[in-house]
Amino acid sequence: MRIDHKVIKDWVAPNSRVLDLGCGDGSLLQQLTASKNIHGYGIEISSENILRCVENGVNVIEQNIDQGLSNFDDQSFDTVIMSQTIQTMHHPDKVLMEMLRVGRQCIITLPNFGHWKARWYLTVKGRMPVSDLLPFEWYNTPNIHFCTIHDFDELCKSLNLNIVNRKILGTSANTRFLQTLNPNLFGVTALYRLTKKL
Amino acid sequence: MSDTASETTALPEDSVGIVAPQTFEFDQPLLLACGRTLDRYELVVETYGTLNAEASNAILICHALSGNHHAAGYHSTDDRKPGWWEHYIGPNKPLDTNKFFIVCLNNLGGCHGSTGPASINPATGKVWGSDFPNLRVRDWVHSQVRLADRLGIQKWAAVVGGSLGAMQAMRWALEYPDRLGHCVVIASAMKLTAQNIAFNQTARQAIMSDPDFFDGDYLEKDTLPKGGLSIARMIGHITYLSDDGMGKKFGRDLRSGSFERGLEEPVEFQIESYLRYQGKTFSKSFDANTYILMTRALDYFDLAREYNDDPAEAFRSAKCKFLVISFTSDWRFAPERSQEIVTALMRADRDVVYGEIESVYGHDAFLVPNQQRYWDLFSAYMQGIDVSLDGSSN
């Protein structure tokens, strides 16, 4: 199991209703169904991914999240997940609020643009960072709203959101010390578990 | 049960081949939604593939407005056209006859062999005509249940339909939740919009205003309201295609005449000739009363009427899984109507896969071949259906 999926699994309650926005091939929902007996739906826009979801036996709905989640009722899911997708949204802040309207909690994972490699790429090469994780050029990338961990923390603060958990993942276990020391410099992926402040 | 011939040479290899319809007689009275009863009736049925020993691999195909039991294969080697869903039923096709035993019937009220307005009313010895009872989607489903019993099928692996056929599939899911594992809803809606009813009403008026209609008793007068039925079909046909698709196929091409100055020769566009031909052919092969009956059944259908007008409450009665498919250029049963189905299913916490297929073929898209994405999604879903004994819920 992917390490970020492992973290998400710990944050999802057994037998709960889960909505996965940008669910990819459905493997996260498949794992959550198997290990936590959740009942889940994935939202996807890519026809290839939708086919993979069907092959994986996962509920998948073709829908463009950028056009909103108005078809979902308030608080109709226990958890709404968006994994490695928020940076592709036209309005990440609005999506975040929508997720917390539809779900009692939301889980966001995002690539940290403040990672030292990205900074090095921009500082030394003077070019927009291209990496294994984000293998796109600036003109063809679906990732249109990059942020750093600090930026996302700030967004949560300004939207008055409660960060229940925050987990930073690096490239390997060896860098765990560095990630703890300076997550914004050494964290590759950030995972947030958020609720609305009461 | 299948009548696939091995010696045929001229037929395509991916076809179920030569098929023959069978007639089933039912003499247990059927109480209809309108309050009347059909004491006895016949249903004409075709089947493709082989029913397994556990009878767990059966699929029911419900036909749409002008469909019938002949969904796939050919009736003879001279047959010019195969069944209406030939492109999607057959070996290694989405409705794979290597895996499934497929059943398709002509619905009650039809005009291709099953009891309908053109049949003889045994009580009077005369043609039913205008006296044939009004049918609703649920009546078809009830009659299909009896067919399933007769065939020894306790639970369908799937009930599948497009358009009006999908309304039957959904009704199955609500009324007989233990008797299907999957419900496949293609290009459909939970109820028609006002605009949609308006088109049906215009078509019916075209038929009824034909002087040869005789209030539905035209057969007694030994005539047919061909002109009216032909116009009804033309109206329907226009709404089943998209502006874009029609433009691509016909444009403003001329069939005859010219716009040259000084010539008074009348001009005929290709689309005019096409529509007229479609209308004319249809009016000779279809019964006008059946057309009225089928369009009314479409209009009357409202999935959630008996469930406090709450589609989610309706779908909570279902136990099966759903595949819902729509087509982008379908304006008669627009993707929004399918999205409403999906939203209701999610509210009801039911399993569902939804795909919106990019297509220029309008409502007819569900019948049109060579649409890779439609094929892939439909195939992948059907392949995932477990037909092992108690597996059709997986």
Image: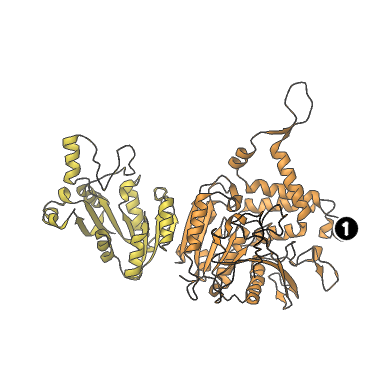
Say whether residue B84 is left or right of residue B304: right
Q: Nearer the viewer, residue B311 or B394?
A: B394
Residue B287, percent across and down?
A: 77, 58
Residue A21, percent across and down?
A: 37, 55
- For badge 1, the amino acid type reads Asp
Q: Which residue is mark 1?
A: B222
Say whether residue B282 is left or right of residue B247: right
Q: Nearer the viewer, residue B90 or A113?
A: B90
Identify which residue is drawn at 21% across, 49% down. Answer: A149
> Is A124 above or below relative to B127?
above
> Is B353 above or below relative to B157?
above
Tag 1's secondary structure? Answer: loop
Figure quadrant of residue B185 = bottom right
Count of numbered circles on the image:
1
Host chain of mark 1: B
Q: Colour of chain B?
A: orange
- Extreme-bottom residue of the structure: B28
Which chain has been coloured yellow in this picture? A
Residue A188, can we see it?
yes
Residue A109, percent across and down?
A: 27, 54
Identify which residue is drawn at 53% across, 48% down. Answer: B328
Figure quadrant of residue A123 = top left
Say whether residue A54 is left or right of residue B285: left
Residue A71, can we see it?
no
